[in-house]
Image (cartoon, rainbow, N blue to C red):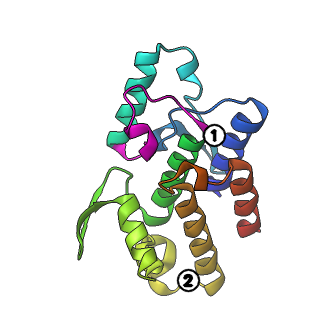
Amino acid sequence: MIAVDIARGLSYLHDERHLSHGNLKATNVLIDTPNLNAKLADYGLHELMTSEGTSNQILNAGALGYRAPELASTKRPRPSFKGDLYAFGVLVLELLTGQGAGDIISGQSGAVDLTDWVRLLANEGRAYDCFDPMLVGGGKSNEKLLDSMEETLNLALKCISPQPSERPSIRSVYEELMAISA
């Protein structure tokens, strides 16, 4: 599972190297073949950049939908573990929905971004409606798969909590994903 591999990589960076990724987004996740293992790329570059370069990198991530809300309210945002968790949650939403982080989705409630759209559907008890039809097989998927997808979605929603203190650690996210995928 790609999300498990990404969580494992982030856990290594956070827990073993004490380093935030700083630029987590879909284009910085490499997938090798034939096993479809995910590998993180472009991490830790903020350690080599000027503070202005790092700020610009984070601010540009916001245009793509990966920037944590707390980083939008500061002029000189710095990479953080909780910011990485937010970006990870967005990546998981992309995997589950088939939508891009920066996509504007039109619906009954008007145009919203990916995170707001998923939150809205989940709050309405319609989480199933946000899943990529290719993943759910037009409703023909088995119940265990749908339950796993919903558990993964709920975990991603925790990761994109507007309050950084409410986001879990990447270690607990990794462990929960391992339990879901078992």
Q: CA distance from mark 1 to mark 2?
A: 28 Å
Q: Where in the figure is residue 175, as x and y percent of width and height?
A: 76, 58
Q: Where in the figure is residue 150, as x and y percent of width and height?
A: 57, 74
Examine the structure image and report whether residue 144 is included in the region drawn in magenta: no
Q: Residue drawn 44% across and 76% down?
A: 123
Q: Main secondary structure of the magenta part?
A: loop
Q: Amino acid at mark 2?
A: Ser
Q: Residue drawn 70% across and 34% down?
A: 13
User: Which secondary structure lies at badge 1?
Assistant: strand
Q: Amino acid at mark 1?
A: Lys
User: For residue 53, which numbered disc appears in the image?
Assistant: none
Examine the structure image and report whether residue 71 is included in the region drawn in magenta: yes
User: Which secondary structure lies at badge 2?
Assistant: loop
Instruction: Specify which label sits upstream in the sequence, 1 or 2.
Output: 1
Within 10 Å of the Cα at label 1, are there few (<14), some (14-19), or many (20+) other Cα atoms?
Answer: some
Within 10 Å of the Cα at label 2, are there few (<14), some (14-19), or many (20+) other Cα atoms?
Answer: few
Q: Is residue 123 left or right of residue 83?
A: left
Quadrant location of the C terminus in the rendered image: bottom right
Q: Residue drawn 37% across and 28% down?
A: 75
Q: Is residue 7 left or right of residue 157?
A: right
Q: Is residue 44 above or below residue 87?
A: above
Which range is magenta? 64-81
Q: Is residue 57 left or right of residue 82?
A: left
User: Along the line of sight, which residue is nearer the eye, 75 or 7?
Assistant: 75
Q: Which residue is mark 2?
A: 141
Q: Is residue 52 above or below residue 84?
A: above
User: Along the line of sight, which residue is nearer the eye, 23 or 145?
Assistant: 23
Q: Which residue is mark 1?
A: 39
Q: Count up the numbered dots.
A: 2
Q: Is residue 151 above or below residue 62?
A: below
Q: Where in the figure is residue 87, as x and y percent of width and height?
A: 51, 46
